[in-house]
Image (tube, rainbow, N blue to C red):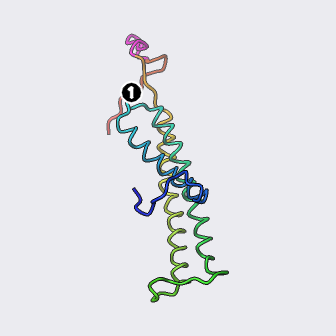
Amino acid sequence: MNTHTNTHIDDPDIPEAVREARAGAKSWRAAVLAQRTAVSDHADFYAMTADVVDTLAAVGSLAEVLARQVAHYGDNRPVYDDTRVADPRERLDAAAMDLYELAARLRSPDRIANTFWSRISHIGVHDPADVNDSDSSIGGAQVPAEVTR
């Protein structure tokens, strides 16, 4: 858990965007815990991966929004660096670049998640009662020949 978070998600004094981000993180942690004990189901893999794709895109967009805000944070307000060693504008510029890099790096896992999402969408589970051994079909579809590499 984030040690910087010492307030509740529903605290009205917390800005809406911060409350929503905390709720999202809390929900993903709950999903991980729930899935650990869940029975494996390809439909769940598909549904949750759709949400992973959506979440990665949203986090990437948030990183870009924050990067723009951080880059211009000192434009109209006096800022300082608490170390008194670094130029605060240089630190803000570097921090903005970190966020732009985060947004860019999130595109790769987004592509991977989308590829998995597509692959898992083609998976189904046969009911053993539907198997007809005499015509080598399963559920009316031809059984593919085994491929070895």
Q: In this view, does 113 lie above or below 44?
A: below
Q: Nearer the viewer, residue 7 or 97?
A: 7
* Disc 1: CA contacts within 10 A as few (<14), some (14-19) or many (>=20): few
Which residue is pictured at 53% across the width and 42% down the height? 50
**Image: magenta residue range:** 128-137
Name the spot of residue 120 as percent of width and height, x first: 47, 37
Q: Which residue occupies the extreme right position in the image? A: 76
Which residue is pictured at 52% across the width and 50% down the height? 23
Q: Mark 1 points at which residue?
A: 145
Quadrant (top left, top right, bottom left, bottom right) of the C terminus: top left
Name the spot of residue 61 as percent of width and height, x first: 59, 59
Q: Which of 116 and 58 is in front in this view?
A: 58
**In the image, what residue type sits under mark 1?**
Ala
Instruction: Give the quadrant of residue 62.
Output: bottom right
Q: Which residue occupies the extreme left position in the image? A: 149
Q: Which of 37 and 2 is in front in this view?
A: 2
Which residue is pictured at 50% across the width and 83% down the height? 81
| Majority secondary structure in the magenta region | helix
Q: Is residue 149 above or below residue 78?
A: above
Is 102 a magenta residue? no
Q: Which of 125 and 5 is in front in this view?
A: 5
